[in-house]
Image (cartoon, grey):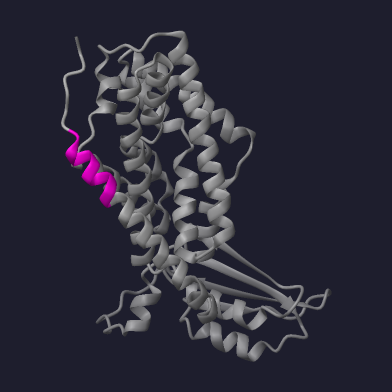
Amino acid sequence: MRLIEVTFPESIDVKPLLKACLRAEPVDHRLEPIDDRGRRLLRLVFRSGDGQEAVDAIQGLLADERDWRLVVLPVEASLPKDEPAEEAPVEDEAVKKRKKTLALREELYQDISQGADFDRDFMLLTALSAVVAAVGLNANNVAAVIGAMVIAPLLGPILAFAFGSALGDLSLMIRSARTAAAGLTLGLLVSMALGAIMSANLGSDELLSRTFVGVDAVALALAAGAAAALSMSTGVSSALVGVMVAVALLPPSAAVGLFLGAGEFGLAMRAGLLLAINVVSVILAALFIFRLKGVRPRTWLERKSAKRSVFVNYGVWVICILVLTIVAWRIAPVDILP
């Protein structure tokens, strides 16, 4: 369940606001009297998956007003328990569409956009995880490689880019793309430095496995990207750790750097292909899941202006993954060991 609180000045007509909110069928609601500051408080309690209609209505009615605020709070418990309905009514298309997304659009934006933040902590975590990944790959240490996957923050900006694409939010797309490019570049440079210092261990199965690219890599990355977007849209962010391990964005980057630093340019190209497949697949799968879960801009005008951007993104990433898949399919495994 979730609690939505709206504070607004007494000058705002409360009748259309309350009517629009009650149309979203909250479990409970309460309108507080005017306080000593001349403000009112409206509390709305919704079941999990509900409330987006009310949030959109409130924003639409108060968009041109000043001195108002909407806050969404999670509800850990509520008593008495809701009585189960005797017979579930047949939901119309509008209700089904409203319940596609369990997390509110605003909740998703707040959580996902934080992954696009470019700050000292992001760079430090990326650098440290690159060191762990490069050393682990070169030493054939599976535990170290998994640890690097878990601590690497690279999945955040890539998911933020996909979310911005689904909303047609150009500013979020640019910010997340800049952060992702900086993170991948830093990981590449760190691993290149390590590759120049220590020779690449061509006997390491963990390192060489990042050079074998096939269609199965596309399927794995698509599934991981879909799981990441699904876990965010349903509010189960703890599942992201498992997704990070599965998609493995940093180890291929570290492998590229190690091979480049050691002068193994052919192997670096293969590892780079795997990295490109992972990144493109995550974005494409996340775009599809966000679309499936009903992530759209709020107003009709915003949806219309974002529609072209969304379809252009779909077209670009579909073409990219098709080209990368064909290249991966055409590359035959080779025996690289002496």
Residue at the (60%, 33%) spot, across then down: 121
- Quarter of the figure with the C terminus: top left
* Res. 71 image quadrant: bottom right
Front position in the image: 291 or 14: 291
The one nearer the camera, 110 or 238, is 110
Taking the spot 56% from the left edge, 53% from the top edge, the residue there is 174
- Residue 179 against residue 78 in the figure, above or below: above
Whether the magenta-drawn stretch holds residue 323 is answered as yes
User: Does residue 71 show up magenta in the picture?
Assistant: no
Is residue 261 visible in this depiction of the protein? yes
Residue 269 shown left or right of residue 195 in the figure: left
Residue beneath the point at 37% across and 61% down: 314
Image spot of residue 20 (x, y percent): 55, 86
Q: What residue span does the magenta drawing correspond to?
A: 322-331
Q: Position of residue 97 (x, y in %)?
A: 36, 76
Choose between 80 and 31: the one closer to the eye.
31
Q: Is residue 245 something that shows in the picture?
A: no
Which of the 4 quarters of the picture holds residue 234?
bottom left
> Disc count in the image?
0
From the viewer's perspective, is 137 left or right of 21?
Answer: left
Residue 185 percent across, percent down from the top left: 51, 32
- Compared across the picture, whether 326 is left or right of 136 comes to left
Which quadrant of the figure has residue 292? bottom left
